[in-house]
Image (cartoon, helix red, strand yellow):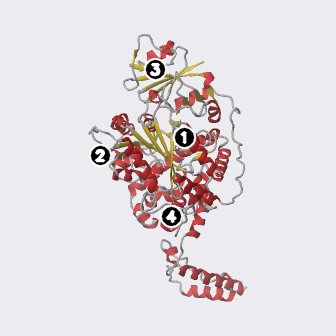
Amino acid sequence: MSTFLGMPATSPPGVGNLRGDEPFPKAARKALANSQLRRNLGHATGTIRRKSGAVISELPDWQELRAAGSALKAATMARLPELLEQLEEKVTAAGGVVHWAADAAEANRIVTGLVRATGQERVIKVKSMATQEIGLNEALEEAGIAAVETDLAELIVQLGHDKPSHILVPAIHRNRAEIREIFLREMPGVDPALTDDPATLAAAARRYLRETFLSTKVAVSGANFAVAETGTLAVLESEGNGRMCLTLPETLITVMGIEKLVPTWQDLEVFLQLLPRASTGERMNPYTSMWTGVTPGDGPQEFHLVLLDNGRTAVLADEVGRQALHCIRCSACLNVCPVYERTGGHAYGSVYPGPIGAVLSPQLTGVEDNASLPYASSLCGACFDACPVKIDIPSILVHLRNEVPHPRAEKAAMAAAAYTMDHPALYTRAQHAAKLSKHAKKLPPPLNGWTASRDLPEPPPETFRDWWAKR
Amino acid sequence: MSSKDLILSRVRAALGQQASAEPVPRDYRSAGSLEPDVEMLVDRLVDYKAVVHREQDVAAVAARLQPGRLVVPPGIDRSWLPPGVTLAEDEFTADAVLTAATVAVAETGTIVLDGSPDQGHRRLSLLPDLHICVVRTDQVVASVPDALTRLDATRPLTWISGPSATSDIELNRVEGVHGPRNLHVVLLD
C-alpha cells in the first residue's frame, strides 16, 4: 500500500512489537497445551475480577463516569490537533522539550540520541506500553545503552528473558514458585534462602533495585494522561518504582502516544476514578505522580516529552475503529475475556493482547499484518461491559473481520449460497443433496475454517418443507 | 516537512470533515456535591494498611514510632519534632520522614503532597522506609473531583494511597516494594 505524505499511516514493519511470528490460532493451540499457564491465568484473572467488581460497586455513579469518560475521549479526538499544540506550548513554557515521532523508528532514534547526549550508558524505566510497542529497549541495547525495567512484573519478564503477556501485569503467566526460580537464577546477589512468599519476593526486588535507582542519571517513562490545559503529565503506579524514576534522575524522557491527552485539569476527575478501579481493583493505586515541565530543586532538571504517532492516525481515520484510541490501558477487558483467560497474552503476538489488542494491533499495523486477531474472540461482549470508557470492542471486531482479506473462493461460495437461498426450488434441491451427504463432517476449502474445530451439523432426516408438504 | 507538521496533517486528514463531538455528559457526583467524611478516610486508610493516629500531639506519636534518623522538610512545624530526636541531613541517610500534606480524599483514602515547604521535594517522602504524614481534618475532601479543585496543577504532586504495594504476583496486593513500607497518618482536628 502506498502512502502519501501527510496522510494517516500505519506502523512500519521491522521495528517494535506489534506483529507476532505466527497467526493467533496456531499460537493459541500451543498455549492451550500448557496447563500451568492456564491455571496461573485462571487464578489471577479470577482474583482481579472479584476485587474490581467490589470497588466498582462502591461507586453509585460508575455508569455516569463511564459515559463521561467515553464522551471526553471522543471530544478529545475531535480536537486533537489544537490540543496537541496546546500541550506542546504548556510543556515548553514549563521548561520541558517536546519531540514529535511519526513512527517507532523515529521515536527510538530520538530517545537514543537524547540518552547519548547525556553520556550515560544505563537508563531506568517505568513500565510503559508505548516503549514496549516501539521496541525501545532493543534499540537502546543496539546503541550500547542498558535499559533496566523497574516495575516488578517487567523485572520478572526481563530477568526471565520472557515476553510480557498482560497490559497491567506483564508476568501474569508466572506464579510465585516460578518467580522465585527466576530470581534465584538471574538476580545478582539474591539470598539463596529466598522463599516464594510474595512479600519476600517483593523485598528481594526492593534490595536489588535500590542501588540502581540511586546511581542512574536518566529515566524513561510512559504517561497515563497528559493535560493539554496545563501541560501536566501523570503516571499511576503501585510500587514506588515510578516515583523513583520520575524524581531521582537528572534527565527524564517520557514517551507518550498522541491519544493520551485530556483537555482540562478537571477532566482528570473522571479518569482518576475509572482507571484504578477497573485496572488493579483498588479505590486508588498507591502512588500517582504528576509533574509539569521542570520544577527547580525538585526532580529531573531536564525533561523531554516524545509524542508518538506510529499508526495512531491510521486508527483515527477509521470511523468505526477509532474508538480503540480511547483505551486507557486498564486491562479490564483482558481479565473478563474467556479467550484471553485460556490462551494468555503471548498468543496475540503483539504487546497489546486480549480484546483491546485484537482491535488495536490490526489497526496500528494495517489489518493484513494481524489478520487473525479480529477472529480471536467469541464476540460474547464481556469486554464491552467491562470497559471503563465503553469501547464497543465486539462491533470493531466485526468491522475488522470485513476488512481482513478473504479468499476469492470464499466470496464465490457465499455468492452461490445467496443465489440458492434466493430461489426456493434450488434451495429444496440443495437440502436434499445435503441429506444424501450425511457422512460429511468437514467442509471443503475455502470453508474448512468453519469446521476446523467443530463438526458440521448433521442434516435432519426430514426437512421442515418436506414435513409441511405432507400436512 | 517536520514530523510535527506530518503528524498534525495526518490527524487532520484522519478526522476529515466530521461534525464536532457530542457534549460531555457530566452526571457523576461533581466537586462540592458531597460532605467530606473523616470516618470514611480513616476506614479507607486502614483498609490499605496505613496506620491512623487520632491525637493532637504529633511529637508524642512520632516519638512512639521510634523513627531513628528522621528527615523533615524545611518548613515543618518544629513543635511536631520529638524532643531529642536525631535529625538526618538528607533523605538518603534517613530512616523516617515527617511531613505535612495538602489534601486528603476520604472516598479513596488518598493523601496528596504538593511540594510546599512543609512537605518538601518529592524524593524526601520516598526514600525513607517510614513516612509519618500529618493531615488536618480541614484538608479532608469527599472525593477525587473535590481534590482536583484544591490542587495547583503546576506544582509537582504525589498522590499516596497506603504504603508502597504491588499486585504483580498472582494479582494479590502485597505491601512493601520501593516506596516507604510503613505509612502512619496523624489526623489533627
Where residue A373 is drawn, which disc sits there? 4
Give, as a three-letter code, the residue at label 1: Thr
- For disc 3, the chain is B
Q: CA distance from mark 3 to mark 4?
A: 54 Å
The x, y position of residue A436, in whole percent, is 55, 88
Give, as a three-letter code, the residue at label 4: Leu
Q: Work out which residue is located at the far front of the displayed protein and give it.
A: B1
Along the polypeptide, which appears first: circle 1 or circle 2? Answer: 1
Q: CA distance from mark 1 to mark 3?
A: 32 Å
- For disc 4, the chain is A
The quadrant in which residue B70 appears is top left
Name the foreground residue: B7 vs A160. B7
Q: Which residue is mark 1?
A: A92
The x, y position of residue A60, in whole percent, is 67, 40
Give, as a three-letter code, the residue at label 3: Val
Q: CA distance from mark 3 to mark 2?
A: 38 Å
